[in-house]
């Protein structure tokens, strides 16, 4: 069987298994106008004024630098902070920016105009159970014949099995699919160092040394990197766009 395109164990720019965002949080920002010909800028409130409510920020004069802003109207500012903020402007709007991460990349998801609206958006996106999109069913077309024989040999007990590879295979009796339980996800260096004491490169080499076909290792890596816990290979399932396909 030949691959239509080569799968790789390196992180893809767009991992087809990636769904949802991690580390969702809210940042309160001030939209500041300061020069007639300049677009507005956005700055967080300095920690010394973080206690101020929105109505003590909106439409108040401020001073700012590249890192933060301070309300100058009606507020006491230390000489040290005053020297660090050389620009002045007016707060036109208080913004609640919703931020998140996907595969360790920071993303700006949207701006809301009240804390309650931002909290509601985070709640809708976060799924508090932590199990959103962690089970996938994909076509066996994503594996070459060698990998399929490996899966079938494992679940039929006709081939030797290894433990400690951070995945476990099982058969589905009512269909022709084979399931895989991924352990210790996500398979990032940081997480694997915490639970295994080794980086992903060591785990990958252990899997290959144990006879796991490289194409299967690549698919499991992409799934585990996206924190997938259950992966089912089924000949009747749909193909996953962006994932390598093998044909006769």
Image (cartoon, rainbow, N blue to C red):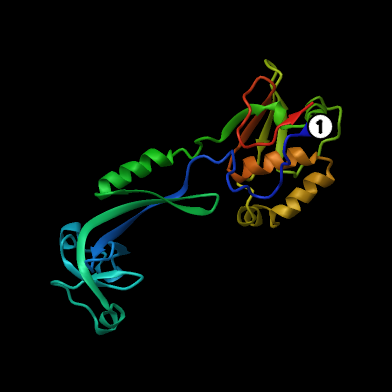
* Kind of element beneath mark 1: helix
Q: Quadrant of residue 160?
A: top right
Q: Quadrant of residue 17?
A: top right
Quick one: 174 or 86, which is closer to the camera? 86
Q: Residues within 10 Å of mark 1 (few under 14, many from 20)?
A: some
The image shows residue 129 at horizontal and vertical percentages of 46, 38
Q: Is residue 248 above or below residue 81?
A: above
Q: Residue at x 79, y 50 (%)?
A: 205
Side (left or right) of 124 relative to 238: left
Query: Image quadrant for the C terminus?
Result: top right
Quick one: 125 or 158, which is closer to the camera? 125
Q: Residue at x 59, y 39 (%)?
A: 16
Count of picture labels:
1
Quick one: 6 or 27, which is closer to the camera? 6
Q: Quadrant of residue 89?
A: bottom left
The image shows residue 144 at horizontal and vertical percentages of 78, 31
Quick one: 186 or 40, which is closer to the camera? 40
The image shows residue 102 at horizontal and vertical percentages of 51, 48
Q: Residue furthest left?
A: 74
Q: Which residue is mark 1?
A: 150
């Amino acid at each position: 069987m030949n691959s239509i395109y080569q799968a790789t164990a390196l992180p893809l720019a767009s991992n087809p298994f990636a769904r949802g965002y991690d580390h969702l949080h809210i940042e309160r920002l001030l939209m500041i106008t300061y020069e007639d010909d300049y677009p507005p800028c956005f700055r967080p409130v300095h920690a010394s004024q973080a206690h101020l409510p929105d109505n003590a920020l909106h439409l108040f004069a401020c001073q700012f630098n590249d890192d933060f802003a301070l309300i100058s109207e009606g507020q006491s500012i230390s000489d040290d902070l005053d020297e660090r903020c050389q620009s002045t402007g007016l707060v036109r709007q208080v913004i609640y920016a919703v931020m998140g991460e996907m595969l360790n990349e920071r993303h700006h998801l949207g701006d809301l105009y009240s804390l309650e609206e931002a909290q509601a958006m985070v709640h809708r996106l976060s799924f508090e159970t932590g199990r959103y999109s962690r089970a996938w069913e994909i076509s066996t077309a994503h594996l070459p014949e060698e990998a399929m024989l490996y899966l079938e040999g494992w679940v039929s007990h006709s081939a030797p099995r290894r433990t400690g590879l951070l995945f476990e295979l099982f058969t589905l009796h009512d269909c022709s699919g084979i399931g895989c339980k991924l352990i210790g996800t996500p398979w990032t260096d940081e997480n694997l160092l915490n639970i295994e004491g080794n980086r992903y490169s060591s785990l990958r080499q252990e899997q290959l040394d144990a006879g796991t076909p490289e194409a299967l290792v690549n698919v499991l890596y992409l799934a585990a990197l996206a924190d997938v816990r259950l992966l089912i290979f089924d000949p009747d399932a749909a193909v996953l766009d962006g994932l390598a396909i093998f044909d006769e």
